[in-house]
Amino acid sequence: MWFLWWSFGLSAEAYWNTSNLIDEMFKREHAVYHEGSFGHPVDTIEAIQHFVLLMVLTVVTWIVGCSLGDSMDELVNWFN
């Protein structure tokens, strides 16, 4: 059961972080085009930081998928 909760928590965290990142990018892009603030939509350093964050979340989500795949046999047998 712990593997299922761990997998759910990490999947939810990855989704939440990614959706927040996309929302912030849209807000920043809107501010650049309509308000003239924040300079460029994304500078190089921030783009690298976001890329690394998303790559870490990708690896974590891949590990979660493997964990769910490994524990699925026990889960299906539990319902039988």
Image (spheres, rainbow, N blue to C red):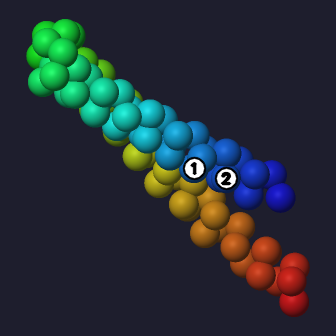
Tag 2–tag 1 contact (CB < 8 Å): yes
Residue ID at (52%, 40%): 16
Pointer 2 local density, CA inside 10 Å: few below 14, some 14–19, many at least 20? some
Left or right of 67: which side holds 31? left
Rounded to the nearest angstrom, the CA distance separating label 2 from label 1 is: 5 Å
The quarter of the displayed image where residue 67 is located: bottom right
The residue that label 2 is drawn on is 8
Element at badge 1? Answer: helix
- Farthest residue in the front direction? 34
Q: Percent position (x, y) of residue 56? A: 41, 36
Q: Percent position (x, y) of residue 32? A: 16, 19
Quadrant of the snapshot with the C terminus: bottom right
Viewer-side residue, 7 vs 35: 35
Mark identifier at residue 11: 1
State whether residue 4 is above or below residue 76. Answer: above
Element at badge 2? Answer: helix
Type of the residue with mark 2: Phe
State whether residue 27 is above or below residue 22. Answer: above
Q: Percent position (x, y) of residue 57? A: 44, 40
The quarter of the displayed image where residue 54 is located: top left
